[in-house]
Image: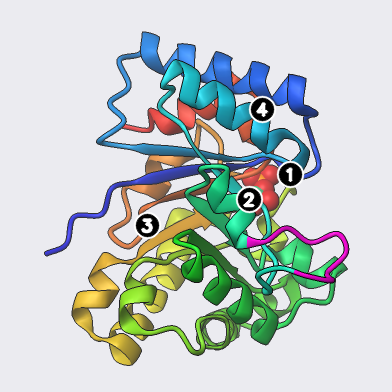
Amino acid sequence: MATRTPLMAGNWKMNLDHLEATHLVQKLSWLLRDAGHDAASVEVAVLPAFTALRSVQTLVEADDLPVRTGGQDISAHDSGARTGEVSGAMLARLGCTYACVGHSERREYHGEDDATVAAKAAAAHRHGLVPIVCVGEPQEVREASEHVAYTLAQLDGSLAGLGGEQVAATVVAYEPVWAIGTGLTCGADDAQEVCGAIRARLAETHGDAVAAQVRVLYGGSVKPSNVAGIMAKPDIDGALVGGASLAAEDFAGIVRFR
Ligand code: PEP
């Protein structure tokens, strides 16, 4: 059976300028080191704003901090006349490991559909980055009990065109929209229901070996107080954390979920 290293990824969204971002990553690293954090047993990543990535990466490299970095978004294109976009080549050159794609805020406020998300995931792979592909249902879909079918359709569309090796090297984040930034956490059993369905669908579409390698994260109001229950579930391999990743103590508490 594949061993999946847990991943705790902090999505800082449009918060923290480059000075605040370096301060936070330094403080987080100190807390983790003081607590004897073993980087091989839980991977930690932060997704700063593009303006802060270079400063964070310089600090991480200079001080050999146990933190990986990623972009909150990535262009589907590799270069050229795409004003405002940041390419996978640029992120890779900065030493990023990850690129988040299809976050519900991108889907909702920037009109990104599954085809766009799939093109961005492919762009990440072209440049050796690991896409963190976000999927998850809005409240009305959950209330209609259609959340599993809805999320699986998003998953299929968002991974369309990727080969098995690329899917195996993709992170999927199940983020029910109604739980993001609201304080409403999906219960651990409910999160497992969908994360388990995601893995089962990946097994159907790409085979058991691929499905066993994919890390499936849960995201939506994860905090130090609820992370242990979520991480106890067999198909949940980590968390995508928004609000709580902006406070070093809280994020360190989430990383030390055991
Ligand atoms: C997110 O934005 O991906 C997220 C999960 O946010 P929060 O943890 O604040 O709900």
Q: How far is the residue under mark 3 from the one under mark 1?
A: 28 Å
Q: How far is the residue under mark 4 from the one under mark 1?
A: 10 Å
Circles 1 and 2: CB atoms closer than 8 Å: yes
Residue denoted by label 3: 236
User: Mark 3: which amino acid?
Assistant: Ile
Give percent across and percent down for residue 232. 31, 48
* Magenta span: 80-87
Mark 3: which secondary structure?
A: loop
Residue denoted by label 4: 55
- Nearer to us of marks 3 and 4 is 4
Side (left or right) of 200 relative to 122: left
- Nearer to us of marks 3 and 2 is 2
Residue denoted by label 1: 50
Asked whether mark 1 and ligand 1 are closer than 8 Å, the reply comes as no
Side (left or right) of 16 relative to 118: right
Residue denoted by label 2: 71
